[in-house]
Amino acid sequence: MLKPSVSAIISTYNNPNALRVIIKTLEAGTILPDQIIVADDGSTKDTSELINELSEPNKIPIIHCWHKDKGFRKNRILNISLTKISSDYVVFLDGDCLPHKDFIKDHLELAEPQCLVQGRRAFIPEPYVSSVLSGQISIAKLTWTFRLQGWFKSLRLPSPLVRKNQDLYGLLGCNLAAWRQDLQAINGFDEDYEGWGIGEDSDLGARLYNLGNHRKLVYGRAIVYHLNHPELSKEHVPKSKARLQNTVDSKRVRCTRGLNLHLKN
C-alpha cells in the first residue's frame, strides 16, 4: 500500500514550552507530516506568538485553530481542526506528550484500511518535566537511570508487537491515528461530552469500532513520552461513562453534535 498523506493534530492548552518541543521534534523527524494543526482550547497569546515564531522557518505548514476559553472543550476544537486537514490520514497527539523522532514514520508504516492505530506512552515524572523541556536532561538518561515510568513502553523494538482488537481499555487520544474518511463517517468527536477524564477518545474509538474498524494496539513503535502534571477535576466522569456505555450498547456510529456543526453548507 502506498504511504498516505498525513496530518498531525496537536491538542494544547496554555503549554507553549511543551508545544515548542513537540513541533521541533516533528520537524526533525525521520518522516515529516504534510501539515501540523494546533487544536488550541483557548490558550492565551503566548501560544499564538509561539506558533507565529515557528511558522516562518518551519518545514511543515502549521495551522492554528483556536476558540475562546470557556472551560474544557477539547472535542469542539478537535472537530474544528479536522475541517482544516487536507490529508488521507490523521495522527492525534496531546500537547503534554513528546513524540519519538520516528513517531510519524511509525504511524505511517502501521496504517491499514479499516483500522485505527493506538501507540503507547511512557511517563516523565513531574519533577523532571521542566528539565526535559529545557534540554537539561534527556529522555534517554531518564530511561537508562530507570526514572522514566513505564520505561519498557519507550523501547523501539526491531519489530513492532501488534494486537488487533476492539477493546475500549487503553484507548487514548494522546497517541492515536485514523483515516480521515472514517472520522468523517462517524461525524468526528462528540461535543456533548463535557470536562476532562473520559469521552473524546473512548467514544471516538467506540464509534469507529461500530463502523467496522479494529484497533491495532502497538508496542515498540509510535512512542510518546507523557509530561506528568496534576490531574484536572473528574466531576464529569460518571455522566461521561454513562454516555459512553450508551454508545457501546446502541452501536451508535454517528454522534449528533460533531463535525456537522463546523462544516459549511
Image (cartoon, rainbow, N blue to C red):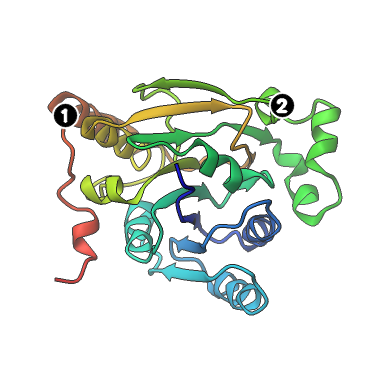
Q: Label 1, secondary structure: give it.
A: loop
- Residue 162 position, x and y percent, is 51, 22
Q: Alpha-carbon distance for marks 2 and 1?
A: 36 Å
| Few, some or many residues within 10 Å of mark 2 (<14, 14–19, 20+) | many
Q: Nearer the viewer, residue 242 or 207?
A: 207
Residue 7 lies left or right of residue 133; in this view the side is left
- Residue 66 position, x and y percent, is 42, 69
- Residue 18 position, x and y percent, is 65, 56
- Name the residue: 32% across, 57% down: 79
Q: In this rendering, does residue 189 appear at all?
A: no
Q: Amino acid at mark 1?
A: Lys
Q: Which residue is mark 1?
A: 251
- Residue 216 position, x and y percent, is 44, 28
The label number, if any, that marks residue 4 in the structure image:
none
- Name the residue: 23% across, 26% down: 245
Q: Nearer the viewer, residue 257 or 54?
A: 54
Q: Amino acid at mark 2?
A: Trp
Is 53 drawn above or below residue 169 in the view shown?
Answer: below
Q: Label 2, secondary structure: give it.
A: helix
Q: Which residue is mark 2?
A: 151
